[in-house]
Amino acid sequence: MTRENLEHTAVPDRQTLEWHEGDMPYSQEFGDHFYCREDGRLECGHVFLGGNGLPERWQQPGPFRIGELGFGTGLNFCETWRQRTERRVEGGTLHFVSFERFPMQAGDLDRALSRWPEIDRERQALVAGWPEQPRGHVDIDFGGAMRLTVVCGLALDEIARFPEAFDAWYLDGFAPRRNPDMWSEDLMRLVYTKTAEGGTFATYAAAGFVRRNLQAAGFMVERRPGFGAKREMLCGVKSTSGVA
Ligand SMILES: C[S@@+](CC[C@H](N)C(=O)[O-])C[C@H]1O[C@@H](n2cnc3c(N)ncnc32)[C@H](O)[C@@H]1O
């Protein structure tokens, strides 16, 4: 049986959501929530922006590309956009590219993101631009040098086909023991290949096999304090010169 067949056997071709505590989406297939239950928006700032040295790195002019494993509700995208606007970054562009196997419906994005009034503007723009049947490449140019592409499909296949490399990665699969495909050695090697020299990654995950796969791929990996109740998170850099 091929890898693709195996994956399709393990998980059906769509994701069934449950809603916990009113507006907290939960994946029945993966048995996990989409972000931490304390505050997913603050977690995003601590883990994904902080772990990648953002927003500070945006002070450099020119294009900046973020790659994400797992678009989910779009919370990381909206919070990243909000921080960029707040920082009044001028002269650069941000292309946020997210790889997602099971894109949600607009109504579900809206329901989940409505929890945070801080990202109202970003949520409304995302939901307004979201297609009724997301498939292929969902490409939305929001103006103001902000562009979103959600690539629908298996991350391993789609990243290999994607023509560009990224300056920063948000590694945001479900918990490693529930969604091991999103943390495999093959995928981490591919992420490394599609990282620009000096580019970085960050993840809330701290499992030993995830750290080892990232190191084996070539990243210099650092452990940092995690968000909220999580003791540790991981971040790192691609440096072929060996100097971080
Ligand atoms: C923890 S959630 C991501 C949360 C998201 N970043 C947010 O801001 O809401 C993980 C996502 O990875 C997706 N996923 C799981 N396995 C995948 C795979 N093999 N390829 C692509 N996406 C996958 C799931 O459908 C889910 O949306």
Image (cartoon, rainbow, N blue to C red):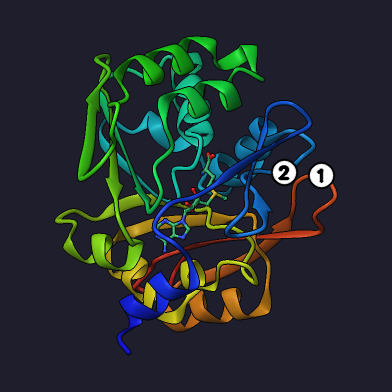
Tell me if the residue at label 1 has its CB under 8 Å from ligand 1. no
| Residue 114 drawn above or below residue 195 | above
Q: Is residue 17 left or right of residue 82?
A: right
Residue 218 seen anywhere in this rendered image of the structure: no
| Residue 73 drawn above or below residue 164 | above
Depth check: 207 or 61 in front? 207
Q: Secondary structure at mark 2?
A: loop
10 Å crowding of disc 2: few (<14), some (14-19), many (20+):
some
The residue located at (85%, 50%) in the rendering is: 229
Is the Cβ of the residue at disc 1 closer than 8 Å to that at disc 2?
A: yes
The residue located at (49%, 28%) in the rendering is: 109
Query: Given the image, on which type of amino acid does mark 1 rest?
Result: Gly
10 Å crowding of disc 1: few (<14), some (14-19), many (20+):
some
- The spot of residue 105 in percent (x, y) is 42, 31
- The spot of residue 146 in percent (x, y) is 29, 24
Depth check: 118 or 64 in front? 118
- The spot of residue 243 in percent (x, y) is 44, 69
Q: Secondary structure at mark 1?
A: loop
| Residue 143 drawn above or below residue 2 | above
The residue located at (38%, 54%) in the rendering is: 101
Q: In which quadrant of the rendered view does residue 128 lie?
A: top left
The residue located at (41%, 49%) in the rendering is: 102
Residue 168 seen anywhere in this rendered image of the structure: yes
- Say which mark, if any, is on residue 145: none
Label 1: which residue? 228
Label 2: which residue? 36
- The spot of residue 201 in percent (x, y) is 47, 57
Where does the N terminus fall, quadrant-wise? bottom left
Query: Given the image, on which type of amino acid does mark 2 rest?
Result: Cys
